[in-house]
Image (cartoon, rainbow, N blue to C red):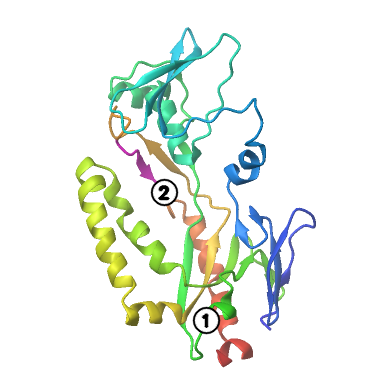
Amino acid sequence: QAGIRDVTAPGGVATLYVQEGLDTAVRCSKRGASRISPWTAFIQPILGNTRLKIRDRCAVRRLVIEQGRVTGIEVRIGGDKRTRVVQLGPKAEVILCAGALISPKILLLSGIGPEAHLASLAIPVQANNPGVGTGLQDHLLLVTANLCRKKLDASDTNGLGFHGFAHVEGRRLRGVQLLIKDTWDVPDMAPEVLTAPLSGGWIGRNILRPVLKTVIKGVMFLPPVKNLVRQSVGIGLALTDPYSRGTIRLASTDPDDAPLIDPGYLSDERDLQVLEEHFDVLHTVRETKKAQEW
């Protein structure tokens, strides 16, 4: 009803939602109705392979580098405070795959990164690579909460919603995705999101954050709050192709300390211009006849 139709290229897409005039598909890591991780997609199917060895409860601390080559991996196993070095064979290869935040942290701790930053922490430089810890991109969300007149239950939302690139009123949404989603998972997400800034230091990570998470979770699951949240639908924009770039830097040489994360949201004015240009789309969706019924 808002004139929304799919404009994604064919192939490799998963249809998430088709209802009330909203029909779209979007490339995403989904299998059926659930998002999947690299572990689910690539490791679980080959768990029975005898060539695969998995060591759980291992925290990678640093790469051991000798003469420009990784010869070992420093790890801490389980709750043991001591570290050990796993030596690699002469033909072994290392694939560092710890995500957008922890991969650069491990590289920096290993002496691979911008020379000035490493020198400021007295970390011996193994490779001066200015690109490590730079170029961080994240999709900023601009979401409006909309209280519904009708009573919602799980059958109305299916925990999914509309999520994709769209064509609205004769124009392409460039650099953004339109989101229409229930808010049923907010009580579970809120304690994690709202306390994330406290995870940097030992006191925040081990004392303040657990206590505050418990308090927030208790508030979110109070019947009046929980019912209010479950009566809401979020309509928003996701900045999927940002111009802004952030950084990952070390807070200290202690591998247990969280990295310093600067997402750099809206540091490039062009991102704000994109959101301003398409903000009226949210109003367009809310004003459809079907939306007004809800």
Please report the residue visible at 28 percent of the width from the left and 19 percent of the height from the top: 122
- Residue 110 vs residue 218: left or right? right
At mark 1, the secondary structure is loop
Residue that badge 2 annotates: 264
Amino acid tagged 2? Gly
Neighbor class of circle 2 (other Cα within 10 Å; few <14, some 14-19, many 20+) is some
Tell me where residue 93 appears, x and y as whole percent.
Answer: 59, 19
In front: 122, or 69?
69
Mark whose residue sits in front, 1 or 2:
1
Amino acid tagged 1? Asp
Residue 231 in the magenta stretch? The answer is: no
Residue 234 appearing in the image: yes
Residue 34, numbered circle: none
Residue that badge 1 annotates: 153
The stretch of residues the image draws in magenta is 257-262
Q: Which residue is farthest right?
A: 10
- Residue 77 vs residue 288: left or right? left
Please report the residue visible at 48 percent of the width from the left and 86 percent of the height from the top: 148
Ranked by sequence position, the earlier of labels 1 and 2 is: 1
Residue 260 in the magenta stretch? The answer is: yes
Tell me where residue 128 appears, x and y as whole percent.
Answer: 45, 20
Can you say which quadrant of the picture contains the C terminus? bottom right
Circles 1, 2 touching at the beta carbon (< 8 Å): no
- Residue 180 vs residue 108: left or right? right
Residue 28 appearing in the image: no
